[in-house]
Image: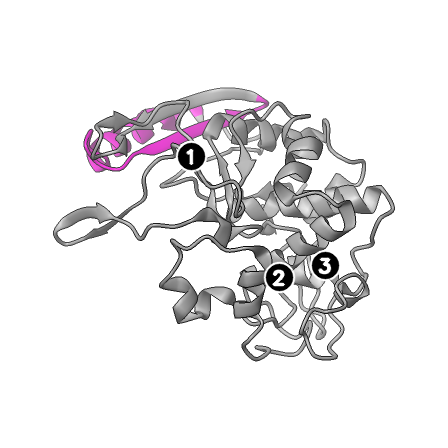
Amino acid sequence: MKKKFITLGLVIIFSGYIFSQNINILPKLDSLNIFLKENIQDTDPGAAILIKQDGKTVYENYRGMANRQKGEKLTPNTTMGIASMSKQFEGMAVLILVNQGKLRLDDYIDTYLKDLPIDDRKITIKQLLTHVSGMPEITQNENFMNSLDKPRSIDEILAIALNGPMRHEVGGKYMYCNTGYTIVVKLIEQITGQSYHDFLAENILNPLDMKNTYSCDINNNAIDIASRYRQDSTGFHDAVKVHFSNLIGGGGIISNVRDMSIWADALLSGKNLPTNYKEMWQTAILNNGEDTHYGLGMGISNI
């Protein structure tokens, strides 16, 4: 019998979740410890790793530094940007609204956002969340990428992103697109009358007791998180400074591995999630019938 394997992705360097009940991870933990000691020195940017099996934590380790300049070590309390894992929370937020009867995944986005400059092309909410919309990609805008330290509202981000041409016909290709997630955040805020930050807290994070997790926006930037670094042949250097409002939707959530393990448990059990939560795993099908293997904010494959 095939099992669904949900890839939650990267937290800083690596954090892993083992979901299959038939994998015995325990004999491999010594090798993992050796690997970490050989590859992450005490003064290197750190790695936070947590492995769960059958609902129990079987491995947890923190190596290296959260902030090299201040000499702060990575600990269980260290929070960090979770990058594109943020998309999973947006997918669930949309399913909550579907469950409440406030929208449908196959609704066209211009049904709600009538002033959005997207020509006359009909694009559904699901197509935006599954990277098949053909929308221009915000991270390909050089001016935007060179000014990530500037706080921006959703409308300011979209004014930049939607200034470019469509990349392909709607539903014609799978092309990773953060712009779609920014658009859907705007949709969520318009339908609910709440900020995305507050909607996530009220409907997902607080019910799951994820106390160290929050979404950033122009009024709520990341606070006291692990520093970001880049590496070249001369060593580690500070990465480009980022105001996390620029990453809203597609990458603007802050968390830590223990909170993310709570999220992993919720995805597997459905506890404190809407009854339709499994729709997260329904992948997009292209116009030619090809499966994209991508659901609402996460890659999906069979093992």
Magenta segment: does it hold 275? no
* Circle 3 residue: 126
* Circle 2 residue: 180
Given residues 279 and 118, the one toward you in this image is 118
Type of amino acid at the residue the image marks with label 2: Gly
Other residues around mark 1 within 10 Å, as few (<14) / some (14–19) / many (≥20): few
Q: Is residue 243 left or right of residue 261?
A: left
| Span of residues in magenta | 26-55
- Residue located farthest toward the left when viewing the structure as drawn: 234
Residue 181 picture location, percent across and down: 61, 56
Q: Residue at x 60, y 50 (%)?
A: 301
Given residues 108 and 33, the one toward you in this image is 108
Q: Residue at x 29, y 28 (%)?
A: 63
**Circle 3 sits in a helix, a strand or a loop, which is it?**
helix
Other residues around mark 2 within 10 Å, as few (<14) / some (14–19) / many (≥20): many
Work out whether mark 3 precedes mark 2 in sequence or the reverse, and give the earlier one: 3
Give the Cα distance between marks 2 and 1.
26 Å
Type of amino acid at the residue the image marks with label 1: Ile
* Circle 1 residue: 223
Given residues 49 and 274, the one toward you in this image is 274
Residue 235 picture location, percent across and down: 15, 47
**Circle 1 sits in a helix, a strand or a loop, which is it?**
loop
Q: Are marks 2 and 1 in contact (CB under 8 Å)?
A: no
Work out whether mark 2 precedes mark 1 in sequence or the reverse, and give the earlier one: 2
Disc 2 vs disc 1: which is toward the camera? 1
Q: Is residue 53 above or below residue 301?
A: above
